[in-house]
Amino acid sequence: MTYIAAGDRYDHGHYRRCGRSGLKLPAVSLGLWQNFGDESPVETQRAILRRAFDLGVTHFDLANNYGPPYGSAELNFGRIMREDLRPYRDELIISTKAGYDMWPGPYGDWGSRKYLLASLDQSLARMGLEYVDIFYSHRADPDTPLEETMGALAAAVSSGRALYAGISSYSPGRTEQAAALLRDLGTPLLIHQPSYSILNRWIEHGLLDTLEREGAGCIAFSPLAQGLLTAKYLDGVPEGSRASRSDSSLSADQLSEQNMARVRALNDVARARGQSLAQMALAWALRDQRVTSVLVGASSVAQLEENVAAAGQASFTEVELAEIDRHSADSGINIWAASSAQ
């Protein structure tokens, strides 16, 4: 059946300006890191993407190696884009990234001009797109000159293969340097994509201030700490959940009793607010107006709907914030810290 987007998709949406740019993003955006590879039925993916757009979620975030297998999320998204979303391309913000391993050999990883631009061409082919709206350097590369990496992002924009340039998991200092280089190249830094959650607050120690000075936006990934900040693990590890898989990025040590005690206490705060834990965690990440958007994953339409509902509930009392702070700590879940330490 031909997809026709909901006529009221913008009636209740919440959008925030991305830094000092002219671009606005939805407060809650959809990330395709998990659940959009070949292990997930395409029709489930289709239903999630359709419902997201119907709810006013206009931003879909991908990367070259999202899957599994690598590249499959872009291929699956490209199919759904072609079959359902093509008429709405000008209403969508589509992003992709390169920086982690993608293909064998010395040219399929990190931050060289060779890798970034070749990867972008491959991503465009997989998705069937002429351009992406945002192209990211996915992580800092300690061995490639920053001038080369930023030059590749600027080349992507000047060639029309991307409209904006972004970086992910860069330290405050390197972010400032990257922004200066891009500015000199005539391609302002649009946005930074760091990990950020109640249990992983590293961006509060300099990065948000840097982004504010540079006029760049911030889109937080893993605001639910890979599902830790949901009700999913309150009573153990469910069969089939991310933490139950041997190849999962959510490891058993991240589900320590100390962390779970924090999560249970936070769940009590959320219940007192009349929210699910996931909704409160997303609203909390959005409490700071410097955070343009939060990226959520979804394995079902119901999960998506729960998460999107958090966008309009980002106000907290001082008492609530103090109680959240009591149970908020560095919980050993920032598995991307090596990049932002560069």
Image (tube, helix red, strand yellow):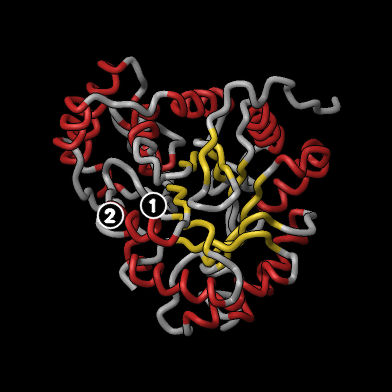
Mark drawn on residue 131 = none
Q: Secondary structure at mark 2?
A: helix
Q: Amino acid at mark 2?
A: Trp
**Residue sitting at the far right:** 2
Q: Residue at x 61, y 76 (%)?
A: 152
Question: Which residue is label 1 attached to?
Answer: 195
Residue 187 locus on image (x, y percent): 60, 68
**Above/below status of 50 relative to 272:** below
Mark 2 vs 1, N-terminal side: 1
Q: Residue 315: x, y in percent?
A: 34, 26
Asked if marks 2 and 1 touch (Cβ < 8 Å), the reply is: yes
What kind of residue is marked 1?
Ser
Residue at screen point 60% across, 48% down: 23
Q: Is residue 99 above or below residue 79?
A: below
Q: For residue 136, which quarter of the picture? A: bottom right
Which one is in front, 71 or 212? 212
The answer to whether 335 appears left or right of 97 in the picture is left
**Residue 104 appears in the figure:** no
Q: Give me the disc on residue 202.
A: 2
